[in-house]
Each structure stands twice: as C-alpha cells, then as structure tokens.
Image (cartoon, rainbow, N blue to C red):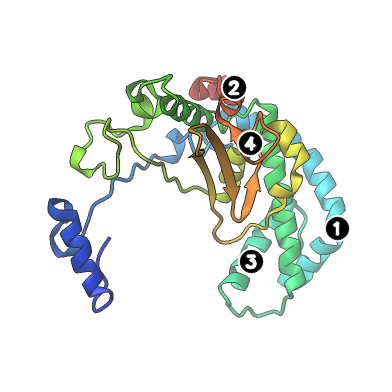
Amino acid sequence: MPPLDNVLNDQWTTWQQELGNKALPYGFNTFPINVQGHEDDFLLHTDCQNCPKFNASFTAGWPDFEKKTKATYATFLTRLSTLFGSPMDTVSQAMNACEYLSWAYYHVIALTFAFTDSDVHTCDSLTVAYYNYFLDVDQKLGYLGANQYLKMILHQLNTITGHLSYEETFFYKTLRPQDPEEHLLGAAASDGQPHFFFYMTEQVHMRQLLSALMGSANRATYPQVFQTAPLASLQFAIEVVQANDGSRYVQAHLGDNDVVLGGCTSTKCDIEAFKTYLASVATLDVPTACAN
C-alpha cells in the first residue's frame, strides 16, 4: 500500500517503525494476493463458463425461469423498452439495461432520458430474481459451485478444533501459493497458519457461497437474506468466536444482518454442529464433477 503525499505522514512514519525490516522503502509494504484465472477458479467463480455440468443445468431451467420472470415484470419490461427506445424481448436484455441504469444511478451519471428511483428498485428486484435462480441451480447440484469453499471452511474449522493439521487442509494443498516467500505471508499464527482469509468475488457468487453455508432449510426459512439489494459493495463475513467458558461457536453476517448457518437454528452456531453440516455437503471433487 503506497503512502499518500502530505496525508497521515506521522502515522506512516510510526507504522514503518513498527513494521521494522518488513517495511519496504518509501512506505510500501507487500501483501500476497493469489489470483486464479476464471477457467480454473472453482473456489469463487464456478458458473456456466467454466463448468459444463452447471451450464447444462442452468440452460435447461432457463426457459421456465424466463417465462415466469417476463410475466412477473411485463409492465416493467415495457417501461424499459420506452426508456431505452428498443424492445426488451428477453430477460437478458432487461438485465443488461438494468445494469446500465443502476450504474448511472449509483454513480450519479446523467443520462439522455429521465428515470426514477422506482425504476432502479424494480431493476434491483429483477436482478435479485436472477441471483436466486442461479442459487436454485447450484442447490439442485448439491452446491457444486460452492463446494470447494465449503471444504476450505470445514478444514479451517477442523484445524481450530485440533482435528486436522494446517498442512493437511485443502487450502494448504491446493490454494496456497507454491514456494511462497515466507516473509511476505504477513499475519500468521506461530504454526504458519493464516489468521484469516479475505476474498473478493462478484455478488452472485458471494450469494452462491452464502446459500451453501446456510443450507436449503435455512435458506427457505430466511429468504429475506437473499432479497438484499445488489449494492455496489456488499460484505459477507464468517468468524469463530470463543466464549468466556472456552467454548467456540460460529457466526456469520451479510452486511448488517446476522445469518443462521447450516445445521443450526440460531445465529450463534455450535462449531461442531456446523462442521457436521459442512461434512455432509462438502463432498464433491469439483473439477471432475463439472466435467461429467
């Protein structure tokens, strides 16, 4: 992260002193970032483009989804056609129009036509309907798109409870950079295991992971979680908390909302109950399953 000229200079000096020999010249400090190409990213980006099985299921269900969605949003599709001066014959065309409309709205960009807040909110509703169709497809496939992430979370929890060593985890064997520069691994426990994992992905895939973490029962019980508007930025967090008596539980949040995880009935999820749920669903070899 580079320093900002004439901004927080005193703080930068203090931070450099605290970092010691880990601080690079001119205030730069390096953090390792692992980036995978879309075709190989089954952890955060499994979809029609890199998973033939997902594509087949998605494509098979699309005509029915499109028919229902066009009926539900018939008046709005006519409205979009009027605004853009071109027909909106398909859901995909409407989604593209909504993406452009939302971009202009959230970035305060003036367009050549006038639109209303109601138009943006209806676009949000249409986008959420598409997201939920995407989640339905993944759920029917046994959370194929989220399976690598589920396995990584399960292994991480097993290391915390002492049932698995870090070197045996899916992350260490599969996702950890090969031959990493150890001094660049940053915040890590004494055994070399990272304190936390931070990932970025598109909203539809983040919701895909969240859907799998909650499970079908809790997704059905708390559908409002997945009605969250597709904001420009949305954060999902999952963490292990140790209570005063030494017991551990898992909790998760989407934005400001608490989430009930799979295998649990409250937002404070017993770690062993959550592990049992994860073990029941994190069972797929994703590259192999996608190819078949």
Query: Marks 4 and 1, how far apart in space?
Result: 36 Å
The residue labelled by disc 1 is 74
* Figure quadrant of the N terminus: bottom left
Whether residue 37 sits left or right of residue 186 in the image: it is right
Rendering coords of residue 119 (x, y %): 75, 69
Please name the residue shown 56% across and 55% down the image: 234
Rendering coords of residue 59 (x, y %): 69, 35
Query: Marks 3 and 1, how far apart in space?
Result: 19 Å
Q: In the rendered structure, which amino acid carries the disc numbered 3?
A: Ser
What label does residue 177 carry, if any? Answer: none
Query: Marks 4 and 3, how far apart in space?
Result: 31 Å
Q: Work out whether residue 160 or residue 110 is closer to the camera in this orientation and state it.
A: 160
**Whether residue 89 is visible:** yes
Q: Is residue 201 above or below residue 141?
A: below
Q: In terms of sequence position, does the residue under pointer 4 or pointer 3 come before the other? A: 3
**Whether residue 93 is visible:** no
What label does residue 102 carry, if any? Answer: 3
Q: Is residue 133 above or below residue 2?
A: above
Rendering coords of residue 106 (x, y %): 59, 70
The residue labelled by disc 4 is 261
Q: Residues within 10 Å of mark 1 (few under 14, many from 20)?
A: few
Q: Work out whether residue 194 or residue 177 is closer to the camera in this orientation and state it.
A: 194
Q: What element does badge 3 sit on?
A: helix
Q: In terms of sequence position, does the residue under pointer 3 or pointer 1 come before the other? A: 1
Please name the residue shown 68% across and 31% down the image: 139
Q: In the rendered structure, which amino acid carries the disc numbered 4?
A: Leu
Q: In terms of sequence position, does the residue under pointer 2 or pointer 1 come before the other? A: 1
